[in-house]
Image (cartoon, rainbow, N blue to C red):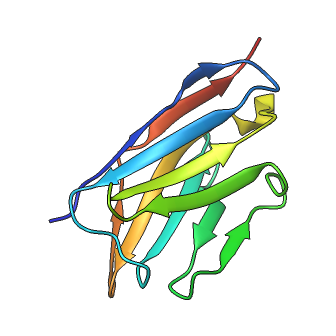
Amino acid sequence: QVQLVESGGGLVQPGGPLRLSCVASISIIESYYMGWYRQTPGKQRELVAEMTSGGSTNYADSVKGRSTISRDNVKRTVYLQMNNLKPEDTAVYYCFVRKWNTGYWGQGTQVTVSS
């Protein structure tokens, strides 16, 4: 079993920065796919940022230029750095990791952007 635990969410001010962390119960290596997704009530879960097994990154248009996905293999942690947060960024953010051909989801962390 693989467990992913997100943290770093909460209430943040518009325009502020945010760093989300996802700690895995197993080692995360470069060949594993990892991504951050988010979901709001009544909406489908959408991709925010991802890093493919080849190391390339992709971002949703709504967060391009102000988001960065990264990882620390020693800490077994995947990060999502976001800047200039907007109210529309409010959502539950989920970490996802695929180890070989099996995918795993975190429990999610709530991010609320409001003044």
Front residue of this view, candidates 45 and 3 = 3
The correct choice, above or below, for 95 with respect to 27 in the image is: above
Rendered-image quadrant of the N terminus: bottom left
Looking at this view, name the residue that lies furthest to the top.
115
Where residue 109 sits in the image (x, y, percent)?
Answer: 46, 36
Where residue 13 sits in the image (x, y, percent)?
Answer: 73, 18
Residue 90 placement: quadrant:
top right
Image point (63%, 34%), residue name:
18
The correct choice, above or below, for 60 with respect to 16 in the image is: below
Rendered-image quadrant of the C terminus: top right
Image point (58%, 50%), residue name:
80
Residue 89 placement: quadrant:
top right
Front residue of this view, candidates 78 and 98 = 78
Where residue 91 sits in the image (x, y, percent)?
Answer: 61, 37
Image point (26%, 68%), residue name:
27
Image point (78%, 35%), residue name:
88
Residue 13 lies left or right of residue 98; in this view the side is right
Looking at this view, name the residue that lies furthest to the front.
74
Residue 49 lies left or right of residue 87; in this view the side is left
Mark count: 0
Looking at this view, name the residue that lies furthest to the left.
1
